[in-house]
Image (tube, rainbow, N blue to C red):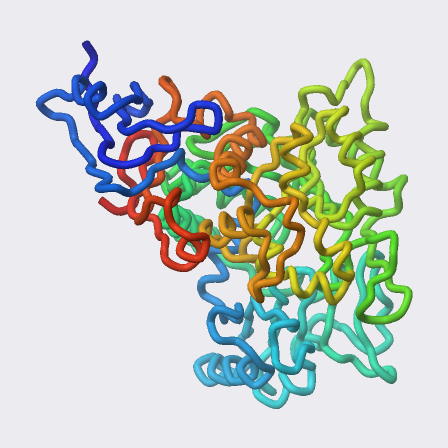
């Protein structure tokens, strides 16, 4: 009889939506050996078996964040954190943080920050170029809104980027002006003017950022992620950094690599160097190709069919590509064999993507089985959802957006559209395997707030946004584990705790199945994370 190397006992172990629960779990090497009652699994113990007493806590398959930006998250840990939970609630708070950063940064050095949400500020607006100049006249400043689709810059940054009041708006972006003067606000491809001249981190700095962010994700119970746009900011240097991290054992968790394919991206060069669907390097696996088609609903740049209720009258958002151009990219990447992972939030952008994938279907290159993804997929109609189900095109939504930005969606789009956004119940019932994710650093990586949102559909402000879209906690975990694994062609390896599956396990601080939703959101933490049977956090 094979003995277990590790046994988990004394708590509730969620094995998977179909598998249900067990009292105990046995692990041999890197794989699940068996599950069952405490008495059954105790017979598999040997003289060197490690027993982990759950003491009434719950354990689940390792969580998988199916869409975030791991490198950006790691690099951002060294920038000004302006997220609402840090206390950023006014323009004065932002200016104070920039002033402090300027005091410790040599003149001419860049000051970068991210995470503010103008809807959460007392003034309910963005900081301006003039305000940033007043606290950092000798430093270029670039602050990204939490969504990553808007940013503000000061005069020094604008000068370095060669942006003037006469600079034309780029296709798929804009540079805000009032009375002919720059306000500092940049949107979508308008941000590229500054992004392209920012100091580039070295390979060692990027590898350290990947490792730092990976260990942080392990501490929250995640054993896998997708980096949703490798190469977006620093080109091929990002690919090199991921390769180096994987090669030198500095990639702490599984990474599904999504390569940036917009014009000027790294997709074509990655193809030439052999980084194609299915290739791998340690914990790094390649598979997806990324395109952006619109912005975000919070920044009024997601492409929607009905105008926004906030902002300028008649605004229906931004499309990054003309339809013919986008469809050409879709066909090209589909025929190269990559899984498509295309950013589309508004219904107009979703239609542009959906019709493009449908048009790419051919006898030589069928879309069946390719699991092409629409990233975010926030605002769609019933007909679009049905077409996705028919074609096998899957959503990659972020439920946490409803918690962090739900009240802003009501302001920008109205209650009816806000309550139907990111329809997790609709996706699940349609068989669309909705993966769960954070899009970090756009939203928090905190899995407990994401789970809370899926089971309550309440915003941070307490607004109920679509009661009919609520999930059970077991279904929410299914989205965070099995569905996320499916989105990465890994469902036979991870996402469930069945015999023979990799022993990726998250152990929580509570029995999450017996606590109120508010406790799940505010008090539950990850106590321990196992990756391939090894304790990689806690213990």
Q: Is residue 50 visible in the rendered structure shown here?
A: yes
For the point 45% across and 38% down, which residue is it? 224
Question: Is the N terminus in the top left, top right, bottom left or bottom right quadrant?
Answer: top left
Q: Is residue 31 left or right of residue 376?
A: left
For the point 65% across and 73% down, which residue is it? 118
Q: In front: 323, or 426? A: 426
Q: In front: 196, or 49? A: 49
Q: How many marks?
A: 0
Quarter assignment of residue 291: top right
For the point 61% across and 77% down, which residue is it? 121
- Quick check: 288 above or below 300? above
Question: Is the C terminus in the top left, top right, bottom left or bottom right quadrant?
Answer: top left
Quarter assignment of residue 424: top right
- Quick check: 15 above or below 305? above
- Quick check: 185 above or below 73? below
Q: Where is residue 58 shown, x and y percent of the image?
A: 33, 40
Q: Where is residue 219 shown, x and y percent of the image?
A: 35, 49
Q: In front: 360, or 332? A: 360
Most extreme residue toward the bottom is 134
């Amino acid at each position: 009889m094979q003995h277990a190397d590790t046994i988990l006992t004394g708590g509730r172990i969620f094995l998977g939506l179909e598998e249900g629960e067990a009292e105990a779990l046995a692990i041999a090497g890197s794989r699940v050996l068996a599950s069952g009652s405490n008495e059954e699994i105790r017979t598999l113990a040997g003289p060197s078996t490690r027993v982990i007493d759950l003491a009434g806590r719950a354990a689940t398959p390792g969580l998988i964040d199916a869409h975030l930006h791991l490198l950006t998250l790691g690099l951002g840990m060294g920038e000004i954190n302006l997220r609402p939970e840090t206390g950023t609630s006014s323009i004065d708070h932002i200016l104070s943080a920039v002033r402090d950063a300027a005091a410790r940064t040599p003149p001419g050095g860049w000051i970068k920050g991210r995470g503010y949400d103008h809807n959460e500020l007392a003034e309910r607006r963005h900081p301006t170029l003039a305000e940033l100049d007043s606290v950092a006249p000798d430093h270029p400043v670039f602050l990204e809104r939490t969504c990553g689709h808007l940013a503000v810059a000061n005069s020094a940054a604008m000068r370095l980027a060669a942006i003037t009041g006469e600079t034309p708006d780029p296709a798929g972006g804009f540079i805000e002006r009032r009375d002919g003067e720059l306000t500092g606000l940049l949107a979508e491809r308008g941000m590229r003017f500054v992004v392209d001249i920012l100091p580039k981190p070295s390979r060692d700095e990027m590898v350290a950022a990947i490792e730092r962010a990976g260990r942080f994700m392990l501490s929250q119970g995640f054993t896998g992620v997708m980096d949703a746009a490798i190469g977006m900011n620093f080109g091929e240097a990002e690919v090199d950094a991921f390769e180096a991290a994987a090669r030198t054992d500095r990639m702490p968790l599984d990474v599904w690599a999504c390569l940036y394919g917009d014009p000027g991206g790294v997709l074509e060069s990655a193809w030439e160097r052999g980084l194609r669907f299915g290739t791998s390097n340690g914990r790094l696996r390649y598979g997806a190709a990324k395109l952006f088609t619109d912005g975000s609903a919070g920044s009024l740049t997601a492409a929607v069919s009905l105008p926004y209720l906030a902002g300028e009258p008649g605004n229906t958002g931004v499309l990054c590509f003309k339809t013919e151009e986008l469809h050409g990219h879709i066909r090209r990447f589909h025929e190269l064999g990559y899984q498509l992972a295309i950013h589309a939030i508004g219904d107009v952008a979703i239609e542009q993507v959906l019709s493009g994938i449908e048009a790419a279907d051919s006898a030589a290159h069928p879309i069946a089985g390719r699991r092409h993804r629409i990233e975010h997929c926030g605002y769609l109609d019933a007909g679009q959802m049905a077409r996705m189900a028919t074609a096998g095109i899957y959503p990659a939504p972020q439920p946490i957006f409803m918690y962090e930005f739900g009240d802003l969606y009501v302001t920008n789009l109205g209650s009816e559209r806000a309550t139907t956004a990111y329809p997790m119940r609709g996706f699940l019932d349609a068989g669309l395997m909705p993966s769960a994710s954070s899009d970090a650093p756009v939203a928090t990586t905190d899995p407990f707030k994401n789970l809370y949102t899926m089971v309550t559909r309440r915003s941070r402000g307490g607004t109920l946004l679509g009661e009919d879209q609520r999930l059970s906690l077991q279904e929410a975990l299914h989205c965070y584990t099995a569905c996320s694994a499916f989105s990465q062609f890994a469902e036979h390896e991870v996402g469930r705790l069945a015999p023979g599956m990799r022993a990726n396990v998250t152990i929580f601080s509570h029995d999450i199945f017996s606590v109120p939703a508010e406790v799940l959101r505010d008090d539950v933490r990850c106590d321990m994370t196992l990756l391939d049977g090894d304790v990689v956090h806690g213990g």
